[in-house]
Image (cartoon, rainbow, N blue to C red):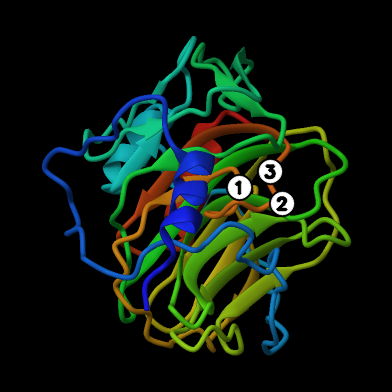
Amino acid sequence: MGTPVTARFALLSCLAPAVLLTGCDLAFPIHDGPEAAPTGVGDGGDGGAADAPSVVESSCDDDGAVTGSYPAEVMKDGPAVYLRLGEDAGPVAHDQTHHYDGAYPDGGIEYGVTGAILGDSDTAVRLDGTAPIAMPAGLDFAGRLPFTLEAWANEAPGNGFGWVFDHSDWLDSGTRVSWNFYLNDGTGTGMTLERREADGLTAGSVVGAGSPYPLGVYHHAVATFDGTTLALYLDGKQVALTGTGGTDLPATGNVWTIGGQNCACSDRFIGVLDELAVYPTALAADRVCAHYRASGRP
């Protein structure tokens, strides 16, 4: 039985962009699938049960060869989406790959904030937690397709679950299937990558890094999945690794969001986001390191 019309309208009202989202030459097919969740559906990022991740002391000194600017290093790895978030105003968040354009919310956003990349005049955006950036459908990464999620984030104190990426859909039963990446975990600073299975469980599909890191400054946050292994990187260094993430995800064809959950939920990122990228491959550690080094940060 499908989502009631009233609930469907409520969700679309929450996420509706100021302009029509369009895509050209999409790198990934848009699949037909279940409709989005009704208003209020979602668990706020409970994290689920999973094996404790193995923390790897991975350095980022000379591991990543940098031959160009930060945008050049990103484009070298073939992103499916690359949002620099340097617009002076909305409504369009321009994708540098020309596959997807996002739509900024009507309010709750500040443009022209100092960006993460040193020596680069491109700016960033500050979100106050009012509403997320809306993205078109696609990028399901169904089955066990690999992917990488990358962002520069300057979190403000007071975040609950700081959702950076959320690609969720709800089955008719109300269970959530998704891939998503959030900073903080509702209790303390950290990072979590989730791949929620078709039964809605997160067991065997979550990796987290719970060690605190300073708020109020930029951090380079990266999550990868290679078909089996989930890994997290903070400021160029691998901080968590687990091999229990090899479960199949369904193709849903749902729209997705940046800076908040993909539903009419209250948990959203508060702070500055910059240089967001999604890749259809799992970046190797040396490439993550190269991106961080290309930022000019020590």
Above or below 258: residue 212: below
Q: Quadrant of residue 271?
A: top right
Above or below 297: residue 281: below
Where residue 88 sits in the image (x, y, percent)? 49, 9
Residue at x 37% of width, y 52% of height: 255
Q: Could one spot residue 210 in this view of the protein? A: yes
Where residue 111 sits in the image (x, y, percent)? 58, 15
Q: Please tell me whether mark 2 sits on a helix, a strand or a loop.
A: loop
Q: Please tell me whether mark 3 sits on a helix, a strand or a loop.
A: loop
Amino acid type of the residue tagged 3 in the rendering = Phe
Earlier residue among tags 1 and 3: 1
Q: Quadrant of residue 205?
A: bottom right
Q: Which residue is mark 1?
A: 260
Is the residue under label 1 in contact with that under label 2 (CB below 8 Å)?
yes
Q: Which residue is mark 2?
A: 267
Q: Please tell me whether mark 1 sits on a helix, a strand or a loop.
A: loop
Q: Could one spot residue 67 in this view of the protein? A: no
Question: Could you give the CA–CA distance between mark 2 and mark 3, rounded to whole angstroms?
Answer: 7 Å
Is the residue under label 3 in contact with that under label 1 (CB below 8 Å)?
yes
Q: Residue furthest left?
A: 25
Residue at x 22% of width, y 40% of height: 99
Q: Which residue is mark 3?
A: 269
Residue at x 53% of width, y 52% of height: 165
Amino acid type of the residue tagged 2 in the rendering = Asp
Amino acid type of the residue tagged 1 in the rendering = Gly
Is the residue under label 3 in contact with that under label 2 (CB below 8 Å)?
no
Q: What's the mark number on residue 146?
A: none
